[in-house]
Structure formats: structure tokens, C-alpha cells
Image: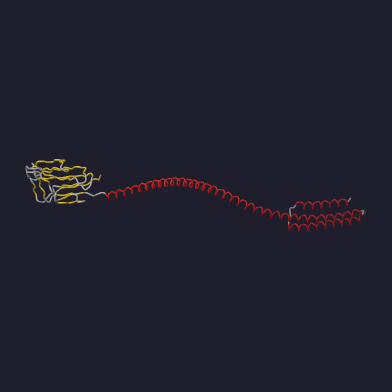
Amino acid sequence: MRSAAVFLALLLCLQWTWAQGESGEVTGTDAETEGGNRQEEVQFEIQGVGAAHDQSSSQTNISPDIWAELKELRDMAIEHRSKIEKLEQENAATQARLTASESKNAVLEAKMSFYENLVTELQRENKVLETRMSSSENEVAELKRENADLLARVTASENKITVLETRMSSSENEVAELKRENADRPKVAFSAGLTDAGSVGPFDTEITLKFSKVFTNIGQAYSPTTGIFTAPVRGIYYFRFTVWEVRSSAWTGAYLYHNEKRMTYSFDLNDNRYVSVSNALILQLEKGDVVYIALPSGYGVYDNSGNHNIFSGFLLFAL
């Protein structure tokens, strides 16, 4: 009966030791130390059981089979303990690897968080760049449109310039032609004053006034000796004359003749300090026609350095 109790106590000790190994509460160096202590305790307990068994065998007759079973049980306990220690070492290594993996995982998670933040920032910057790109594209499109408008305006201006250049060339040709024609056309113009002697007339007969003070005589068509203008070419001519009188109660006036034909008669009476008479005509003359001013009989004029009496004419254009 006592042997059965000892055997039961041994089994309980083994079960408790196994349970402590499976609980995994200790790892690493502490586990090795505690494992060695437990092995010694188990051996001591087994030895105690063996001693108790020896003591009790002296008192009771126990079957040799029980002792053999206890020894076998001790060997199994030692073998199991070795396996448990090996498993504990493997578990410690696995735990260390797990800790390292967790550390690596934490690092990877930190990196992943960093890269996620970086990706978010890049996405935000990409949106900003897309917005700027869209704005730039709109600006480019606007610049292209403005450039097209400017190009159209430049093209229109160039076309206008071409037209103007054509017109300018045509005008230059016309001017050159006019210059050529003008160079070929005779230039006729004259202007002359009457005299510096003072009073002229009145006379009993009509006389031709000789405007002897020549101011201009281009083409030499006017003769100050005779007072007669002779047309050098067929054309349209302009003539003007002025006569002046200072003697009181005196008549003044003049005729303008084209060849033998009297074209105008202008006169006035000096009832004050002086009197002036003027007139002008445009005449078509043939080459060799003459024009002159005549003083009617009984009429007088007065002239001095003030040039109050003038006879002028010029060619408008040849025919």
C-alpha cells in the first residue's frame, strides 16, 4: 500500500514538471538554469523514492517488478525532460526569431508609413502640377490663338503693304511720267511793273502800256519793250492786271486785248485820295497769239517804286 502511494507521488511530480515546461513562462538562460534545477529535483525525488523504497522493502516484501518499473519511469522522465529542454530551446530560438521578425516588421511598417506619406505628398504635388500643367496648356492655347490673330493681322498688313507698294510704284511711275511730260512741256510765266516815273496819261488816243519793270519772265514770252505777250505754244493761259491812280477827279482804267479783240474793259473815277482797278482772265491761245494792256484815251495811271500797276500771266497747260 505504501509503495502505491510513493508511485502516485512520483507521477504527480512528473506531471507538475511537464506542465511547467509546457507553460512557456521562462525562456533563454533562465529556462536552462531552471531546467537543470528541475532535473536535479526530479533525480533527488526519484532517489528519495528509491531510498524510501529500499527502506520500505526492508519492512515489506515488494515485488522486484515495481522497482524495475520505477527505474524505467525515471529513465522516461529524464528522456522527456531532455526533449522538453530541446523544445524549450527551439521555442526560445523561435521566440527570438519572432522578436526579430516583429522588429523588422515594425521597421517595415515605419517605412511603409513613410512611403505612404511620401506617395500621398507626391500625389498632392502631382495634382498641383496637373493644375499648373492645365493652366499652362490653357495659356499656350491662348498664346497660340493670339499668335494666329497676330499672324493674320501681320498677313493682312503685308497684303496692305504690297497693295500700297504697288500703288506707290504706280504713283512713282505716274510722277516720273508727269515729270517727263513737264520737262517736255514749255514753262511760261511773267510778271512786270509799269514804271517808276509817276503819272502816265491821259492821252488823246489809246496806247499800249509798256510794263517795263520785269520781275519774272520764264520762257521770255513777254517783251518789256513793246508790252506785248506772245504765246510760245498752244494752250490755256491765265492773265491778270491792276492799274492805279492818285490824281483827284481823274479817270483810270485799262483794256485787255487778245490779238485785236478787246476782252475786258475796267475803269473807275478817283473821287477820293486814290483809286485802283483790277481784273483777270483765262484765255485759250494759239501759238503766236498776243495779249497786251491798253490805256484808253483820256485815262491816266500813276506808278512808282511801290509797283501799283502790274501785268502778269502764265501757261496753265499746253494743248
Name the one closer to the observer, 280 or 18: 280
Q: Is residue 123 left or right of residue 139?
A: right
Relative to 291, residue 55 above or below: below
Relative to 109, residue 278 above or below: above
Percent across and percent down for residue 278 are 15, 43
Percent across and percent down for residue 5 are 86, 51
Q: Quadrant of the C terminus?
A: top left
Q: Is residue 63 left or right of residue 79?
A: right
Name the one closer to the observer, 102 or 18: 102
Q: Is residue 75 left or right of residue 272?
A: right
Name the one closer to the observer, 210 or 23: 210
Quadrant in the picture for residue 70: bottom right
Percent across and percent down for residue 66 are 90, 53
Q: How many marks?
A: 0
Q: How is the image coloured?
A: secondary structure
Percent across and percent down for residue 228 are 16, 47
